[in-house]
Amino acid sequence: MKKKSSEKKRHVVAWVNKAEWDQMLEYLYSQDSGLQRYALQRISAWKGRYASSTPVAVDCTADLVRCQVLDRSGELAGADLVLLYGTALVRFVNLITERQQGKVARPLRRLAGNLNIPEWVVDLRHDFTHRKLPTLKWCRKGCKVVLEWLQQEYWSRQLGGGPNEDWESQSDGEDEEIDLKRQEDEVIARQKEMEAYKNARELLISFENEKFKAFDRLPGDKEKSLWPAPFAEMSWILGEIKQFSVESSDLLVDVLLEDGFLIPTVEQLETLGCDTSDNASPRLPQTFLRFWLPLLKMLNSPSFIHLLLEKLFVELKLLSKEQNNHRAFYISAWISEIILSNSNKFEYHFETKAQRKARVKDRIFVNRIQLRWQQLLSACLDAPCIGTPHLLQLILDDMEHPLPQETQQRLLQLCSIYTQTAHSECDPFPEQKQQPIYTLESLHEKLQRSRCHSHSSLAEFARGKSSQEYKWSDVQAEKEKLLRGSPWQLCVDKVLWKNYPLGKVPGQSDDPSCLMVGNYSTMTVFDQPVELESIAPHNIPGASAPLRTTDGLLWNHSDVSKLKSGLQLF
């Protein structure tokens, strides 16, 4: 007969009170070897009181702490420490999972997963038992992780009351039922996933077959990129793919990114008459793009485009560790095509309907959508490849809220250095294009050249400065000579003239009378001397009035009256 779950359990413990328990927990997880040794001695006393009923967690903790103490003491060699750590870790995995085993033996990985024990710890135990001994570094790491697990799952739970080892006391029958149910659910989910995957591949293969049939029916003298309208069979296939994308778009994108679909094989490219060589610029062949346009135009919802871009960048990141230029090229090309379809860099205000129709014919989608620019930027920088500078330039040009120009240039420059490619066209440093700094040796060479150049520049600057000072003193003396005897004088002070408006000098008051000179004389217009050059008479076309000579006045009275009436005093 089972006890009620609400009935409080009682335990006989080996420690005196809660204070001793707290003290042992603090000493065991201390970095002081002396305190840890004292805690191990107290646990030995506990074992004498417990006899064979010592809690498994306490026993395993003592074994692992003893390994750390001996490791810090330096008394044992590396091979001895590996064996010592291995014994403690094997005992931990075996003892903790022992009560989880039912009548039928089950894998330790599954039992450890039920207890939130990392799977690699079980693999470490397997290596100790059946394979080559792990390194001392992995032994220390395993000991540290296991002690953290024991502190969280056992020691910290005792602070609120008596021992609580629910992970040790589950009944075999209940655990077996839960495990069997989990196995059944996993098998059913795996079967559904395999069936959906098979269905997605069959639909995409059917689409490809219909497109290749339509391609073969085109006349040989006609442009192969002009695809006919879809037939009834193709329309049905597109409808099925659309329905499948509604149910499982994530799986559909995974299948699309497999080799043979959006990533073409060499045979597929040769059949379509496309160039099989991968160019430097990631752009899709026109025929191959139009091959997939009917499908992509049908699936061009914002959610699908976001998911496709995310998966493309994930694949590109995985390829950064592999040498697969063909796959990386076409993944980069699809990313470039999607971003260009969304680009608003060019405006088409004056195009006709026919021109617009021709322009949008080869675009996956026409209307601009709100892309997740910050995520795209991070994903692009996280997946470096030969096409990353091109993709980064597209993202920076098309962002809704662009980064500062200086930040963009630095990102592009760092990207080109990391990917070992040339700078982009908008690089504001043309001298760096001639010799980019890619290695430490080239940096040293450039530093030496800059030092030599700076020394020669300083010498030239010194010579030029002395000659300039000499010329400047001559100019100053000439100006002072010209102004000698006049009320004006030359200003030699360092004045920021940009801070003063035109016609005003430092220290000048707002009174206009300050501009009047002290000594001046008045003279009427008629008394002013007039010097006329003797001009020989010429026949000037269109000139009817005779030329004036020195015999008469330059201005008559009517001219003077007009001048006076137009003057304004201020």
Image: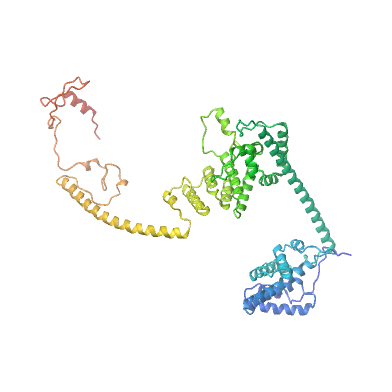
Residue 364 appears in the figure: no
Q: Nearer the viewer, residue 211 or 31?
A: 211
Color style of the picture: rainbow
Q: Nearer the viewer, residue 388 or 165?
A: 388
The percent coordinates of residue 299 (x first, y second) are: 66, 39
Number of numbered labels in the structure image = 0
Residue farthest along the left direction in this orientation: 551
Residue depicted at 37% across the width and 59% down the height:
451
Left or right: residue 290 compared with residue 483: right
In the rendered image, residue 364, in percent from the top left (x then y), is placed at 61, 38
Using the rendered view, name the quadrant where residue 231 is placed: top right
Q: Is residue 352 visible?
A: yes
Determine the image quadrant of residue 245.
top right
Q: Is residue 24 above or below residue 396?
A: below
> Where is the C terminus found, in terms of image quarters?
top left
Which quadrant of the view contains residue 305?
top right
As drawn, is 276 to the left or to the right of 187?
left
| 488 lies left or right of 67 | left
At 47% across and 47% down in the image, what residue appears? 405
The one of 284 and 18 positioned closer to us in this rendering = 284
- Looking at the image, which residue sits at the far top? 544
In the depicted structure, whether residue 103 falls above or below residue 33: above
Rendered residue at 56%/40% (across/down):
340
Extreme-right residue of the structure:
1
Which quadrant of the rendered structure holds the N terminus? bottom right
Q: Position of residue 161 (x, y in %)?
A: 75, 69
Say whether residue 365 is left or right of residue 521: right
Percent across and percent down for residue 561 are: 19, 25
